[in-house]
Amino acid sequence: MLDKHAVWLLESVPEAILAPPAPGQDDPMDGRGRPSQMPAAFTLVSSPTRRRNVSQLLDQGFTGEQLAYAAQMTLRKEGRKTEADIIKKVIAADGPDPTVVQASYRGPPPSLPKTLSADEALVLLFNTNMTRAAYQEVRETSKDHVTDIFPPYNFVLDAKKRCHPAGVVVDDRGASVPVQQLLDHTASRLCTLQASVIQSSAAQGSLILTSKYGFDGATGQQVYRHRQSTDVDDSTMFLASMVPLRLRTEDGRVIWANPKPNSTFFCRPISFIFEKESKELTTATYVQLQQEVESLTLSVVELTNDVTISVRHEMTLTMIDGKVHNAIQGIRSQQVCSICRAKPTEMNNIDGVLARPIAGDRTQHGISTLHCWIRSMEMFLHIAYRLPFCEWQARGEEKQRIVKEQKQRIQTEFRQRLGLLIDQPLPGGAGTTNDGNSARRFFLEHETR
């Protein structure tokens, strides 16, 4: 060791190390052979240590204003002017509210989960096609994670019952509700939904609810295994329904407008019966509904704050197809035009068709664009089947074979290029695959190669 550290041992020792400690100064050696710790920074020590360090200032009886002013001066000497100005403004007599300053640095309080109302939960239930078991499972899972935002299912059932109109009659053959009570319920629900709009726009007094209605038959329905009368066939059904379109004031201001007027989402059933569509059933339904519509009265709705609204109803029969239109016009043949009464043998005479008189009641039911698209598509398809010989009637085995081959080729190409099933019969004799969606794509994607 002497040989290795001889140079270091021969150096002189600083006098500061050999000098004894000054009076009042702690010995760097604490008596146990270890040097004592150096004092740490004030911001790094614990709260009890801080209190001990400032106890002498507190014992001298300084006020809070004096200590705050001293803190200002100290911060200014250290060059921390912003912190000094904050302290000055907080303790000033005309300064901001200390609670406001406290909230500014603490930030906004955490937002609590908002519980869904029964109506909101019902909307979620319908939009997601959620079953009762699925809803309860989601609710229990939400409660396990301390976010109980779903109301109990019995509250949802009560909200569902509030959606039912009064006067519903149900039997083995079907169900029905009076048109007056259905419209009263519809007007009440719409006015309650738009209560804030009605009150803010001063649209009080009388409103007008415009709706459309109609009826049609449906076949090929699912047959369920349950007890029923032997004379009831639930594979066919005849349904009458209505759709609210617009709620407005007398001067034309719109309070509510149907965002999807052609969707079944807002469709409200009037009646349905398990019976096949026929001319007699169509005519009887038309007469009954016309009588109910003509005898409609005002719907009175009472809102909050003693506000009473009277709603007048305007209903138009436009939700019908050509078959129903012919039936209510008294036309037996489906080949005869229900507007001008032209027969198939007369339709090629364009001038003669245009010269035919048209009564006003024949056009009051509108024109179904859905069926117009379908019939136009079928016309182009049938022309394409007969293009090789350019005749409408395919007489003879050779022409019938050509039509069959052309039809199979066109159907195959539509299936491969567009994924559409064109002009194919449905099982059970329930029409063909030519529907509105196929017709829309037929015309929208006509440039597909």
Image: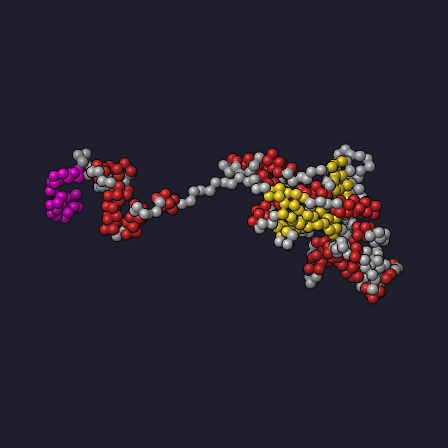
Residue at (66% x, 43% y) in the render: 300
Residue at (81% x, 47% y) in the render: 283
- Colour approach in the figure: secondary structure
In the displayed structure image, the side of residue 99 where residue 295 appears, left or right: right
Q: Give the range drawn in magenta.
A: 1-29
> Looking at the image, which is closer to me, 201 or 361?
201
> Looking at the image, which is closer to me, 111 or 409?
111
Residue 284 lies in quadrant: top right
Residue 273 lies in quadrant: top right
Predominant SS along the magenta part: loop
Q: Which residue lies furthest to the bottom in this view?
A: 351
Is residue 122 inside the magenta stretch? no
Placement of 33 over or under 434, stated as above or below: above
Residue at (13% x, 40% y) in the render: 21
User: On the rendered image, what quadrant is the C terminus found in?
Assistant: bottom right
In the displayed structure image, the side of residue 234 where residue 96 appears, left or right: left
Q: Residue furthest top?
A: 227
- Residue 270 pos. (x, y %): 73, 43
Residue 350 lies in quadrant: bottom right
Residue at (62% x, 38% y) in the render: 159
